[in-house]
Image (cartoon, grey):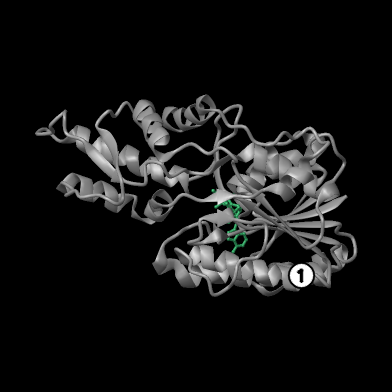
C-alpha cells in the first residue's frame, strides 16, 4: 500500500512509521517541515527499507500542505491511506491562535489534500481529552459547545467534527489516545510534552530545592491533585499497534478511544515519581482541601499549573470500538501493571 503520514518526526509518528514498515512492503510518504529531522528518521532504517520511505517537504498550515504541483500529480489516485498525526500538543491558553492554526486549519488542509489526491481512507489522530470537562468518555463526537479545559482540547474537538464532515468524500476514522507515555517494553520516549513536561518540571524543582543551603530536609512539597483521581497513561507502542491495524480494520465513520481500562491513581503515580526522583519530600494534597501552600509549594504548583486540570478530575473511558478492532489480532487489550508504569517513569529520569 501507499501510505501518507503527517507528524512522522514526532513521538507517536516515529513509532507508527516503524510499525508500518516492519514486515510489510508498504511505501510511506512523509510530509515533514524539518528536513534535518526527517533525514535522521530515514537513516534509522535499513538501506533496503529506506527505498520505501519518501520525504515530502511541506507544512500542514499551507494550502495543499505546501507540496509541489509535481509531487501532487505523482501522488494523485495512488494513496490508499492517510494518517494525520501532526499537531501542536501544548495546553497554554496564550497559544490559542497557533493551536487553532496548526490543529484545526492544518486538519482542514490535510483533508482537502487527501480529497484532491482521491485518498480512500483518512485516519485522524485526536485525543481522548476531547471529552473536556465531562467525566465519562464515549466513542462518539462531543458537542462543539461543551466546556473544554484549554484551546488544545477545543481545537481537537472542532477538528473531529470537521473530519466527520468529509465522510462522504472518503472513509474517515478518528483515533483518540489518552496520555501517551514511553514504550511498554523499554520505557523509551521521544517526548517533551504531557507526562514528560510534568516530570521535567518536577526534576527542575527538585534540583532547585537541593541547591538551597537553608533547605529543611523534612519539609514536604505538595502538589494539588485529586489523590483518588486517575491519570490515563497509554504506552506509545500500544497506540502505534492499534493505529497500524487501521489500514485493514478501521471502520468508516467510527471513533476509537485508545485508553487504559485500569489507570493508576494520582497517589500511586506520585509515589512512583518520588521513587524515581529519590525525592521523598514530594507529596500530594487533595484539590478540595483546607490548606495553605508554602512559597516553594506555590512555585511548584505554578510550574505544573497547565496540568492541574488533568490532576483534578477523574475520567473513565469506553473503548468497545477499539476492543472490537483488536479482536482476533496479535494486539491485546491494554493491561499496564504498576511495575511497567514505574519502569517508564524511571526510564525518563535515568536518561
Ligand atoms: N503525546 C500525547 O500524550 C498525546 C495524547 C493524545 C493524543 N495525541 C495526539 O497524537 C498526535 C501526535 O502527538 P505527538 O505526541 O507525537 O506530538 P509531537 O511529538 O509533538 O509531534 C508532532 C508532530 O507534528 C509535526 N507538526 C507540527 N506542526 C506541523 C506543521 N505545521 N506542519 C507539519 N508538521 C507539523 C511535528 O513536526 P516537527 O518535528 O517539525 O516539529 C511533529 O512531527 C497529535 O495529533 C496529538 O494531538 C498526543
Identify residue for label 1.
Answer: 113
- Residue at image point 54% right, 75% down: 145
**With respect to residue 115, does 173 lie above or below?**
above
Residue 57 seen in render: yes
- Residue at image point 55% right, 28% down: 337
**With respect to residue 283, does 143 lie above or below?**
below
- Residue at image point 43% right, 52% down: 313
Q: Quadrant of residue 16?
A: top right
Q: Quadrant of residue 219?
A: top left
Q: Quadrant of the C terminus?
A: top left
Quarter holding ligand 1 = bottom right
Q: Is residue 117 shown left or right of residue 132?
A: right
Would you call the spot at circle 1 few (<14 residues within 10 Å), some (14-19), or many (20 or more)? many
- Residue at image point 46% right, 49% down: 314
Q: Is residue 9 shown left or right of residue 219?
A: right
SS category of the residue bearing label 1:
helix
Q: Is residue 258 shown left or right of residue 326?
A: left
| Residue 276 or residue 119, whichever sits in front | 276
Residue 351 seen in render: no
Counting from the top left corner in percent of width and height, residue 7 is at 64, 54
Counting from the top left corner in percent of width and height, residue 35 is at 63, 53
Counting from the top left corner in percent of width and height, residue 263 is at 53, 39
**With respect to residue 101, does 237 lie above or below?**
above
Amino acid at each position: 500500500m501507499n501510505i501518507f503520514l503527517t507528524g512522522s518526526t514526532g513521538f507517536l509518528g516515529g513509532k507508527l512509521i516503524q510499525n508500518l514498515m516492519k514486515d510489510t512492503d508498504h511505501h510511506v510518504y512523509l510530509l515533514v517541515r524539518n528536513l534535518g529531522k526527517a533525514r535522521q528518521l530515514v537513516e534509522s532504517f535499513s538501506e533496503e527499507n529506506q527505498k520505501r520511505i519518501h520525504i515530502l517537504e511541506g507544512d500542514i498550515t499551507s494550502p495543499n500542505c505546501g507540496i509541489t504541483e509535481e509531487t501532487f500529480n505523482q501522488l494523485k489516485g495512488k494513496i490508499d491511506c492517510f494518517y494525520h498525526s501532526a499537531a501542536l500538543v501544548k495546553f497554554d491558553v496564550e497559544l490559542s491562535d497557533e493551536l487553532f492554526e496548526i490543529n484545526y486549519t492544518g486538519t482542514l488542509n490535510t483533508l482537502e489534500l487527501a480529497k484532491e489526491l482521491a485518498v480512500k481512507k483518512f485516519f485522524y489522530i485526536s485525543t481522548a481529552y476531547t471529552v473536556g470537562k465531562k467525566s465519562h468518555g464515549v466513542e462518539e463526537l462531543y458537542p462543539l459547545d461543551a466546556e473544554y479545559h484549554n484551546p488544545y482540547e477545543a481545537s481537537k474537538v472542532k477538528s473531529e467534527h470537521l473530519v466527520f464532515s468529509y465522510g462522504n468524500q472518503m472513509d474517515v476514522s478518528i483515533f483518540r489516545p489518552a496520555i501517551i507515555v514511553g514504550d511498554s517494553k523499554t520505557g523509551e520516549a521521544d517526548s517533551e510534552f504531557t507526562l514528560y513536561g510534568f516530570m521535567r518540571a518536577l526534576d527542575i524543582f527538585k534540583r532547585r530545592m537541593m541547591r538551597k543551603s537553608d533547605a529543611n530536609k523534612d519539609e514536604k512539597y505538595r502538589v494539588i491533585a485529586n489523590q483518588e483521581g486517575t491519570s490515563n497513561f497509554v504506552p506509545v507502542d500500544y497506540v502505534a499497534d492499534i493505529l497500524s491495524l487501521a489500514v485493514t480494520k478501521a471502520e468508516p465513520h467510527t471513533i476509537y478511544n485508545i485508553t487504559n481500562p485500569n489507570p493508576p491513581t494520582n497517589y500511586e503515580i506520585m509515589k512512583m515519581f518520588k521513587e524515581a526522583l529519590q525525592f521523598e519530600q514530594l507529596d500530594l494534597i487533595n484539590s478540595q482541601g483546607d490548606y495553605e501552600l508554602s512559597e516553594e509549594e506555590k512555585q511548584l504548583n505554578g510550574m505544573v499549573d497547565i496540568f492541574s486540570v488533568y490532576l483534578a478530575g477523574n475520567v473513565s473511558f469506553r473503548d468497545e470500538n477499539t476492543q472490537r478492532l483488536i479482536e482476533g489480532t496479535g494486539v491485546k487489550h491494554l493491561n499496564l501493571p504498576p511495575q511497567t508504569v514505574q519502569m517508564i517513569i524511571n526510564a525518563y529520569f535515568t536518561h
